[in-house]
Image: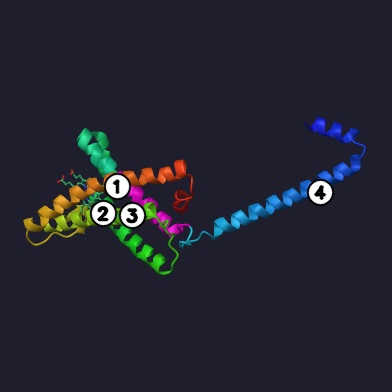
Amino acid sequence: MGVLVWSLHALSPSFTALSVFENYYRMRYGIIRHSLEVTEKRVNESRGWRDDGERYGRVSRWLHWSIAGLLLTQFTTVLAWRWLGSTPLTQALAAVAPHGLVGLTVFVLMAVRLIWAWGMRAASARPMQSANAVGEAARVGHMILNALTLCIPGAAILRSWASGRGMEVWGVRFIPGAERQMPLLEMPADWLHSTLAWALLALALGHGAAALSHRLIARDGTLQRML
Ligand code: HEM
């Protein structure tokens, strides 16, 4: 290719003029490319801690993916126990990621996330859903997901307390037990924890599928707002 370009140059009657043009456009293209790279870098850097109306900021993204990762851990462990029973693998999973402690962490992170989202919304910095039926469905779906993610560990904490046993992990007491067992509180909390947890799994799978369809089918920037 280089030889061909050189031969064309050599054959050209305006050899010098062509080289000057070529160098000029190379230089100009280089400057444009460089300034585009600088702009892109600045835009990326400006994606700070807060949401910016178009995309979620670092805090929202970190909270979202941490909670998603912890929920994935919870369901993997619970399903592994259901399907495999007590094996070295499930024992190891339970030891590395104790169900109660992971759930408690989800509860705390979710509370922080809701407070942060409320602050961002008050500052009009939260990215908006589209103003149509699909956008409205997404908004309601997210509200239910958030409510479930808070209520499921909430019900487990209540159950733990009402059982009178509380919760202790690695020798540390995380939830105190009530002075006496309260079956009237314990039983509904137990039912809620289990039923809502399976509903959350179904909804979270739907949420993941919807996010992927935005990326792969609609090809809009919805998923990128959270990346
Ligand atoms: C987001 C957090 C949580 C999720 C998604 C979750 C999910 C689940 C699921 C799917 C089950 C199985 C239910 C069934 O077999 O029908 C379960 C059981 C259980 N969870 Fe959670 N959980 C969470 C938080 C917690 C917390 C914070 C605690 C303790 C305070 C806890 C304690 C338990 C216990 C003791 C069981 C066994 C109950 C039984 O089999 O009777 N969970 N959880």
Please give the residue where the numbered disc 4 appears in the rendered image. 24
Residue 182 visible in the snapshot: no
Q: Earlier in the sequence, mark 3 or mark 2?
A: 3
User: Are the two marked residues, 1 and 2, in contact with CB atoms closer than 8 angstroms?
Assistant: yes
User: Are the two marked residues, 1 and 4, in contact with CB atoms closer than 8 angstroms?
Assistant: no
Q: Earlier in the sequence, mark 1 or mark 3?
A: 3
Q: Nearer the viewer, mark 1 or mark 2?
A: 1
Please give the residue where the numbered disc 1 appears in the rendered image. 203
Asked whether mark 2 lies closer than 8 Å to ligand 1, one says: no
Label 3 sits on a secondary structure element that is: helix
Give the distance between the C-alpha atoms of the residues marked 1 and 3, in whole angstroms: 9 Å
Could you tell me the amino acid type at mark 3?
A: His
Q: Residue furthest right?
A: 13
Please give the residue where the numbered disc 3 appears in the rendered image. 142
Give the distance between the C-alpha atoms of the residues marked 3 and 2, in whole angstroms: 10 Å
Could you tell me the amino acid type at mark 1?
A: Leu
Asked whether mark 1 lies closer than 8 Å to ligand 1, one says: no
Q: Earlier in the sequence, mark 1 or mark 2?
A: 2
- Residue at the spot 93% in from the left edge and 37% down from the top edge: 13
Please give the residue where the numbered disc 2 appears in the rendered image. 148
Could you tell me the amino acid type at mark 4?
A: Tyr
User: Are the two marked residues, 2 and 4, in contact with CB atoms closer than 8 angstroms?
Assistant: no
Give the distance between the C-alpha atoms of the residues marked 1 and 2, in whole angstroms: 10 Å
